[in-house]
Amino acid sequence: MKYLTRVSILYLVLPFLLFALGWLRLSIAVPVVLLILWTTWKLLAQSPITNCQLPSPQSTFYLLLITGTWLLLSGIGGYAFQNWDHHWRNAVLHDLIAYDFPVINSAPEKGAIQMLVYYVGYFLPAAWIGKLLGWQAANFALFLWAWLGVLLVTLQLGNALKTSPLKLAFLLIFFSGLDSLGALFFATDYPTLFPPIQHLEIWSGNLQYSSFTTQLFWVFNQAIPAWLCITLLADKPITNHQLPISPIPYKLLIYSFSFFFAPLAAVGLLPYVFIELFKQTDFKSPFKNLRFDILLASGIIILVSFLYFSSNTAAQERGLQAIALKDFLAFFLLEGGILWLALAPLKWRDPRWAVTGLLLAVIPFIQFGSGRDFVMRASIAPLFYLMIMTGEAIFSKTTPRSLLVTLYLLLALGALTPLYEINRSVYRTVQYYSLESGQRAQPTSGEVTHLPQPGVPEGEHPNALVADDIRTLKFMDDKLSKNFIANVRQSLYYRYISPR
């Protein structure tokens, strides 16, 4: 695939352009869109053709089959069982299709102006399809969009690690912490290892480092673009070539897109960006070939995203949370610490290794908002880099045999977590399609104001395939809905840059 990097950049650019045209007043949207188009065109014109070797036709078929099956079982598109979080993802897509942009649920002359304030960027291409062709077409477009994103991630990983994308697809799907041991030795009630369809991730209560399969099955709209941004930064696809531009603007542009799609994941990614900038900055002439238009575009993307996200005050609770030492040690070691320590003989000189260990140790103590979202999402980047370093070790011919055995053993134990997620999807999907049409649960009708808190994932919305109880966020008034809708009247975003 000769244009891998270029396609990846366009994949990130398009949703932001759609966002700018819908969520910014015209006098701001036009120059912002023109600037992004200009910098993107210049960047693509000056970037080299990526020397990426596609697998053989047979391997390409298997890559499409494996990633497509993975996407199908994730529930994206509604073709297989959807976990509880899809209630909210579907509600966001419903509102993006049904309402004009920006999505405003109520706007009285006085009082609260209720607006959808969420990470909507990833849904926008599918939402536009839905506006034209309806709900089913939007879901199919969302499925294809996600499939393209996963393929770009695996191809970029293969390019970065100089190995088969098919191998990297398996690594991405089955990479996880040792949740099975946590469930076996530390979980008091749920989860257990039998039946093999339970959600092993929650063995440590409010602390969770999600496997990549779990991320895809629950929060694909944040996970896929975050993965792609990380692979673009890790691969150094532009800086491996002699170009008339500095690598710094390119790195910052990719990072700005990660902030737009998944700001919590971008927090965990920031230290790695500093590492890349430090390694690739020529301190004798730091401003040589520096592209200020790309820097400006990056700054605007981050500023616009920050103003929009900060208009929702639901996550203003910040601080540190206390964790008992024994609970922290169990969580850290089982959720990546043992694997991180096993890599020390090979990677202890690598700053990525040190930063990864530090982040995995610090993130559990940080409280942001009322839930555990920060721990789950800020950990995406260090977990992804841990996977990359593990891949570098197991695909290297110089790795000692004893270390290889250790790494493969840890990977095999960790693979139980994604296998349980996949098993649950297969079990519930087969169960649904085995029912007579009269036994299948019917979609909810009427105004939904409250969604009951989830129980065990394998028991959610019985006799139903999709998690689609919230047809619009307009009437929701429970606590969790505040993560999606907010009173924006006094926010800087609404006062200065939103269309009115």
Image (spheres, rainbow, N blue to C red):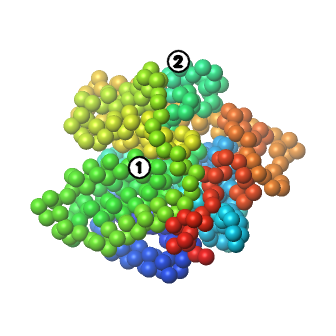
Measured as percent of width and height from the top left, residue 318 is found at 48, 44
* Quarter assignment of residue 122: bottom right
Residue 325 horizontal side relative to residue 443, left or right: left
Residue identifier under label 2 = 185
Name the residue: 55% across, 71% down.
Answer: 495
Q: Residue 295: percent from the left, percent from the top?
A: 32, 68
Q: Is residue 247 above or below residue 292?
A: above
Labels 1 and 2 touching (C-beta < 8 A): no
| Residue 154 percent across, percent down from the top left | 43, 50
Q: Residue at x 82, y 44 (%)?
A: 441
Callout 2 secondary element: helix
Dot 2, how many residues are within 10 Å of its Cα: few (below 14), some (14-19), or many (20+)?
few
Q: Residue furthest left?
A: 284
Give the labeled residue for mark 1. Answer: 267
Query: The C terminus is located in which quarter?
Result: bottom right
Q: Position of residue 78 (x, y in %)?
A: 68, 51
Residue type at mark 2 is Phe
The amino acid sitting under disc 1 is: Val
- Viewer-side residue, 463 vs 250: 250
Q: Which mark is residue 101?
A: none
Q: 10 Å neighbourhood of mark 1: few (<14), some, or many (≥20)?
A: some
Quarter of the image where one finds residue 365: top left
Q: Is 108 drawn above or below residue 173 in the view shown?
A: below
Q: Residue at x 51, y 33 (%)?
A: 207
Instruction: In this rendered view, identify the residue nearer to me: 386 or 356.
Output: 356
Report the side of 98 relative to 238 (left or right): right
